[in-house]
Image: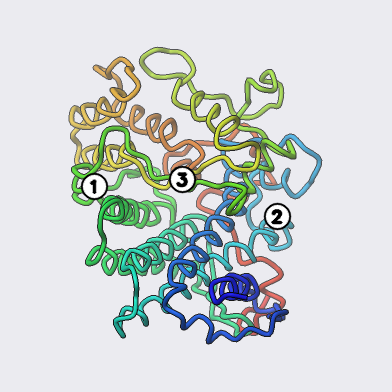
Amino acid sequence: MTKKMKLISLLTSFALIGCALDVDNPNSLLEADLGDPSAAGAVANGGWNATLNGVGYIMIANAVAGDEVVWTGSRDAWRELDNGGMTNVYNEFVDGAWPFITEGRWMADKAVSVLEAFQADGSLPDSQDLVRAYLTAAMVRVYIADMFDDFVYSDKTVSGTPFGDAGMSVMYDEATALLGKAASIAKDDNVVRVAAMKARVAHAKAVWGKVNPVNTSSPYVNAGTAEAAAALALMDGDYKWRMVYGPGTVSNNMSWQINGRLEMDLVDSPAHGGTKGGDPIPNDLVTGAKDTRMVAEEAVFRTDYGGTDYAPVTIVSAREMHLIIAEGKMAGGDAAGTLAELNKIRAFDGLAEYTTEDAGAALQHERRANLFIQGKRLPDMYRFGHTSTKWVSGILSGPGVFFPIPISEIRSNDNISQ
């Protein structure tokens, strides 16, 4: 077996990092095999693919709890999430996602530590592998901090200490630090990705502050605007950086649950004749018709990129950069500037411009339309006071509530008491 093949097998063997795991290595490989610099690219790829897999698992649970996805199947744990129940540590699908998102975090950090060591001793063949590792480790932290009320960094069988609800914002700071390291050595496309992620992280941290606790009276943030402008200066047109899934890498569990198993559906989808009772696609504030951006993204999710299991997920985009800048203007009371910035997004699709529309309503609508199925909706729902038609009193956990550490980690981690 070649060293690169050994490494891939090793990465698979060490992948799942929950405290209860028995990390067996069927090929009797040693972690020392990670010390081969020629395998640096495979190490970076291992962290990236594990993170994509984990994001797909947790994103579907997050999306069905909001107003982007509706439960249409037979599993009661999905119905609980669809009805807004977020706090049940026994929910099988949050618990089932846990090993994959924690694997992504661990693998991303492992890639960083291994490749940093190569860089330090001058043996790293390609510095952009380390940049990709930094980007992956930063990215997975943002998704976790956006979707969990608590988390823990366990290391194989060694129990970590939970961050606690109030400590989750530290993950954004860690992401910023990782991106700072990446920026110093990034080249080519990675320069754009790092710049855009800096804006994304700064904005997400500020939004976190608006939902911990929820502040609907002053929901707008002025954060990440300078970073967003810097990223836009590097982008060509309607730029998107996407997680692209495929049969040669990993599948997207969110895509499979919606397109394959049909356990969920996107909003109250025309694909099902609008009969599933989900939240409808909203009408554009200018045209009065169903928002064409969401309809188009639904089509991409269903039909493109190789079939039912491989729908892509946008990480950052030029549209999001404009949204961040527009929100900064809104937070500063510049309604005209907000609409002008939003019109730059509408120009991508040839849509009529905003003129006299309410700037706050326009910003909220444009965020919903242009960030559809990107894992960014639930914090917006909380801070803007939006609700889902599927939320049920008595099951709904309340505004500002995200996922807990689930029962599998609670039972295996000595630092957590139920």
Amino acid type, mark 2? Phe
Callout 1: few (<14), some (14-19), or many (20+) C-alpha neighbours within 10 Å?
A: many
| CA distance for labels 2 and 3 | 19 Å
Which label belongs to residue 376? Answer: 3
Q: Horizontally, is 275 left or right of 251 in the view?
A: right
If the image is split into quadrants, where does the C terminus sit? bottom right
**Which tag, 1 or 2, sits closer to the chain's start?**
2
SS type, badge 1 = helix
Q: Position of residue 263 (x, y in %)?
A: 73, 39
Mark 1 vs mark 2, CA separation in Å: 36 Å
**Nearest to viewer (mark 1 / mark 2):** 1
Q: Which residue is mark 2?
A: 93
**Residue at 69%, 59% in the rendered image:** 88
**Which residue has dot 1 on it?**
231
- Secondary structure of the residue carrying tag 3 is loop
The kind of residue tagged 3 is Lys
Q: Residues within 10 Å of mark 3 (few under 14, many from 20)?
A: many
x and y percent of residue 101 in the render? Answer: 57, 62
Q: Viewer-nearest of labels 3 and 1?
A: 1
